[in-house]
Amino acid sequence: MADQGNGLGSKARPASRRVAQWMRDYVPLPGIPDEYIGQDGTPRPVWSRFFEAFATLTPAEIERRFGTADRHLREAGVSYRAPGESSDRTWPLSHLPLLIDEAEWRQLTAGIVQRAQLLELVLADLYGDGRLVAEGAIPAAAIAGSPEYLRQVSGIKPPGGRYLSLYAADVGRGPDGRWWVLGDRTQAPSGAGYALENRLVLSRAFANLYKAMNVERVAPFFEAFRDALRAGADRDEPRIGLLTPGQFNETYFEHATLARYLGFLLVEGDDLTVSGDRIHIRTVAGLKRLDVLLRRVDSNFLDPLELDSASHLGVPGLIDVLRKGGVVVANMPGSGVMEARALLGFLPSLCRRLLAEDLKMPNIATWWCGQPSAREEVLSRLDDVAIEGAYRRDVPGFPGQSPVLANKLPPAERERLKTAIGERGIDFVGQELVRLSTMPVWDQGRITPRPFVLRIFAAATAQGWTVMPGGFCRIADQADARAVSMGDGARAADVWVVSDRAVPATTLLPAVDNVRIRRIAGWVPSRAADNLFWLGRYLERAEATLRLIRALATAPRDPVKGSSTVLTVERVQRLLLAWGAVSQTVRAQPARVGAEALQSEERFGSALSLVRAAQRTATSLRERLSPDAWQVITEMAERLAQEVEDDDGVIRAAELTLQELASFAGLAQENMNRAAGWRFLEMGRRVERAINTVRFARQFAYEDATGEDLDVLLTLVDCQITYRSRYLVGPLLAPMRDLVVLDPYNPRSVAFQVSALNEHIANLPSLKENGLIERPQRLAVAAQALLTTAEAAGLHTQTLFGLEQDLLNLADAIGQHYFPHGPNASRPEKLTGLA
């Protein structure tokens, strides 16, 4: 490694004077990143090209573009969770990419492809003939000690023909300039979706620079991966699902991103069931066959019948379906055994044995302490190696520490570690300490060197392994590090593989001349339909609460005690109390009612709580919501969380949030495909609006309602203009009831909502084959008949209460019919026509 203490010095002449001056201004000495300087001591040409263009930007322009990238991450909701955390963090994207030239990338690609081929052969033997263990090439204990070796999978030939469909390796550059493999990812490699998002963000922020650098596109990799999964199925147009643990998983955003980008169904374990020898998805149209499952759930949790019985993430019977060749699972359960550090030391000899060649990219020197000679080697040089867990991230007996450096432990702890290795060496490995190379990071207006780890992805295709030109780069916040993870305060970076030639633009959209035109809407899993239904209900509840808050805040400040105005205000407050928006204690303090109903975090019925509930529900629908729709929901939650100082602030926040709710409704109306998903979102909104409007009518259009009561009702249902254009008199009870409850032309009336519900239900698939009208439709038709034949004069408070109960029963019937849980979830009444 070149001496960094002299800055660019005389060896920087290949770079222009402008770049040299720019580096002096923005790089504190001795702080030049390793990646910038090659082995000959001169700047790498790829970085010189980058900084030549980057140096033309003014500081203000640089900050503006960085701000654009940050704003996109925030608005698009790009997020992750650190292990053990319950809330999302904004994705920490570094503003500068990692650059790799074309020649060096070819070397990396060759090493990754060879390694993927090797691990596939090893897996095939471990779960097949078992010759490697029988002949002593791998110690049996090294395999048997791994919780990822699944005996239940032994002997199963993987449907689709491969154990690994997607492979990833974490690599780092050492002080000698060579790349080393730090670890293999064969279980369910994560990071590809974030790599895609990193590329989208940075290529937009630096569009001209991205194009001028001739950066290799990543779309062909994803296209090849998708086509390979499709080819592995046993029918021409397979249905592919991405199995996720759910929205509380650390990388759920990535799962949704990949599902949306690749066109896969995002499914959870509860969405799937076994019928016959196949896996099926529970949809609102019954059971639909699933052909390929790209899993992001660890192997042990995939089947509670044969693996971890406590798992709620998998599919009972999945392993048996695999035995019968009924579904392709990528990666094959049990493939995670190759991630064990215990096996790293055996890979060089395995490569020579199985491929008749040396490893093109070696892993860092590793000694598995399950062998006496290796254990003695590690104990003899304990202060010179890092101690890692052989099969898991943490070091046994030292929770939360990985790796453990013996020379940094107190004497008592060092002895405890030494004793543990001596007594049960099978659980430990020793690894050579290798300092990672550094890359440039923009930190507070300066270029700072930080260590990094690069994750490179390879996909198995019919033509062999194809490698993503780029990858997922993680940057440590510490100045010296050997390995980093996103849970350890690290940042991520885009990876640009730079070509000397112009790179053609590519896309996942197929060519026009080879596409068979289709107009099918696709199938909606029952869980997704359930979430869409409740998303609509939560947002509508929030709107109703905000309208009550606005009506309360705009009431006269000092009404005469005992006047009708005071009584009307008390009715508004009682309704907020009944809805769980305020507490009884606060209701006694009228000045605080509006603020608590707006943004209380403790009250489940406050506007803030309802919008956050909608946001949580929307989180599980990320693959189905547009970025604009997600942004609107996020902005509402952020706005309502901001402290308000007085009644004017309450009104302002309520009105702006109502405008954003209208924006979301417009996006859903204009941008969502008219498929079952849209219908369930609309049904949630319509049924909740109908219920709330009936409650408003009961509360403010009762038999002895005053003019103030009726005027508030007009405000709550947003019908002032309509009423006054029809009637040249003040608010009267019968016309008000007709307009609010019975008028089929008023988009805010109960009758309008029920009519829309009937239309949506009629357009949903029938789940029974007996020809009888199903319960949701029966209730909806009955409600519409009641509203069609009723007269305003006959709408007494008791009648309105009965109508409210009918609507609540209709909402429950929709949930029970289309979103079944428990023993009814397999829909035994419709077993024919499984697609």
Image (cartoon, grey):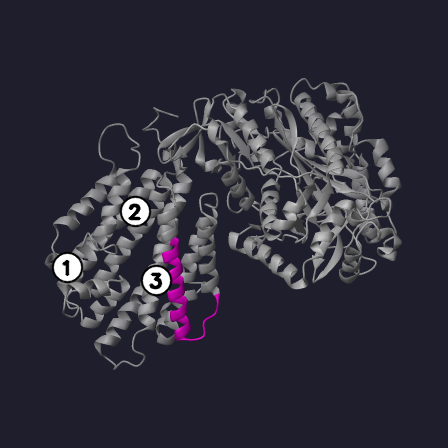
Dot 2, crowdedness within 10 Å: few (<14), some or many (≥20)? many
Which amino acid, by three-letter code, is at mark 1? His
Would you name the residue on which mark 1 appears? 796
The residue shown at (50%, 31%) is 511
Residue 650: quadrant of the picture:
bottom left
Quarter of the picture containing the C terminus is: top left
Q: In this view, does 439 lie above or below 219?
A: below
Q: Give the magenta part as a residue range.
A: 642-664
Element class at badge 3? helix
Name the N-terminal-most of marks 3 and 1.
3
644 magenta-colored: yes
Would you name the residue on which mark 2 appears? 811
The residue shown at (22%, 69%) is 711
Position of residue 260 measured from the top left corner of the image (x, y, whole percent): 50, 40
Q: Determine if residue 396 is in view.
A: no
Apparent side of residue 184 relative to residue 5 in the rendered image (left or right): left
Apparent side of residue 363 relative to residue 542 in the rendered image (left or right): right
Which amino acid, by three-letter code, is at mark 3? Thr
Which amino acid, by three-letter code, is at mark 2? Ala
Position of residue 676 measured from the top left corner of the image (x, y, whole percent): 35, 39
The residue shown at (68%, 49%) is 97
Q: Is residue 114 above or below residue 527?
A: above
Would you name the residue on which mark 3 appears? 545
Front in this rendered view, residue 439 or 563: 439
